[in-house]
Amino acid sequence: MTKVKQKAIAKAKLMPKARFITFEGGEGVGKSTQAKRLVNSLKNKAIMAVRTREPGGTPKAEAIRSFILQGKSESWGAGAEAILFASARLDHVNELIAPNLKKGTWVISDRFLDSTRAYQGLTGGVNDTLISALEELALNDNNPDLTILLDMDPKKAFQRMRTRDADKSLAGEVDRFEKENLDWHIKLRENFIKIANNNTKRFVIISADKSEEDLAKAIWQAVVSKFPELKEEKKT
Ligand SMILES: Nc1ncnc2c1ncn2[C@@H]1O[C@H](COP(=O)(O)OP(=O)(O)O)[C@@H](O)[C@H]1O
Ligand SMILES: [Mg+2]
């Protein structure tokens, strides 16, 4: 074996195994903010990490994202939407998630499969058999190692969203799901909790009703407690 190869193997042994972490929850709970922060925290520990999102993440999947979120698929019904999301996910997994994990880069996704189960399945009425079959098809054995459910009262989350939209002068460009009423979002929150309770090994539920900083700390604690090998990594 060459010295270069030996060095690469020794380095790989020191690095913790690349993990796949997903953020889930309703609109405005802080998923995008915290996904960004988690990637930065990992990079501060000299761990390679990429942030991605669903729907989307790859050019083909982003094309499907635009189609759905602009409301063009609404008249097709939740079943067709679930199939479209799964098609996008298949490309996302094969082109971005699996290759990154394989080369040792942690993948942090802002939403993933549980959003399809919560939105189109439990809230949209698509039956469990179809949702489960689509999950299996799109995942191709790339299940998340950890899913962080950010949970909070949708009323408060809406308040945050209004600030966000005002920030970016996006007021008026409300997407396909953001325009659903409060009762719909309350149901969605309950459904996410149901999914978490059915997958307790993979999920942690964290109350998102705290400052950005405090929430980032709670998330980091949950990540380290799930992957204790992170404790041994030195800060650069
Ligand atoms: N912990 C927090 N407290 C208050 N506002 C927050 C917090 N986290 C995020 N925000 C703000 O709330 C809005 C929604 O956050 P975002 O991360 O986009 O949520 P999501 O991706 O879950 O929809 C943004 O304007 C963001 O700056
Ligand atoms: Mg977001």
Image: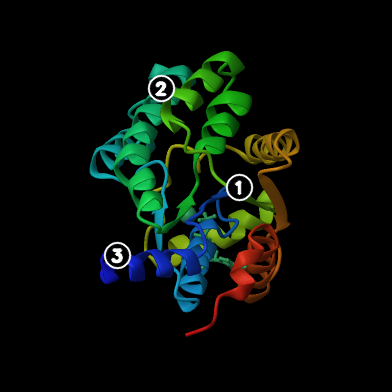
Image quadrant occupied by the N terminus: bottom left
Above or below, 37 relative to 22 = below
Q: Where residue 84 sits in the image (x, y, percent)?
A: 37, 26
Task: Give amino acid for label 2.
Answer: Ile
Write down the residue under mark 3.
5
- Residue 148 x/y as whole percent: 63, 52
Disc 3 to disc 1, how far (Cα)?
43 Å
The kind of residue on which mark 1 rests is Gly
Residue at 60 percent of width and 38 percent of height: 181
First in sequence: mark 2 or mark 3?
A: 3
- The residue positioned 42% from the left and 29% from the top of the image is 138
Residue 78 point in image, percent of width and height:
48, 21
Asked if the residue under mark 1 is in contact with the one under mark 3, i.e. CB atoms within 8 Å, the reply is no
Q: CA distance from mark 2 to mark 1?
A: 21 Å
Q: Which residue is mark 1?
A: 25
Q: Quadrant of residue 193?
A: top right
Residue at 41% from the left image edge and 19% from the top image edge? 80
Residue situated in front as seen by the camera: 160 or 20: 20
Instruction: Decide: few, some or many residues near mark 2? Use Cα within 10 Å; few <14, some 14-19, many ≥20.
Output: some
* Total number of numbered discs in the rendering: 3
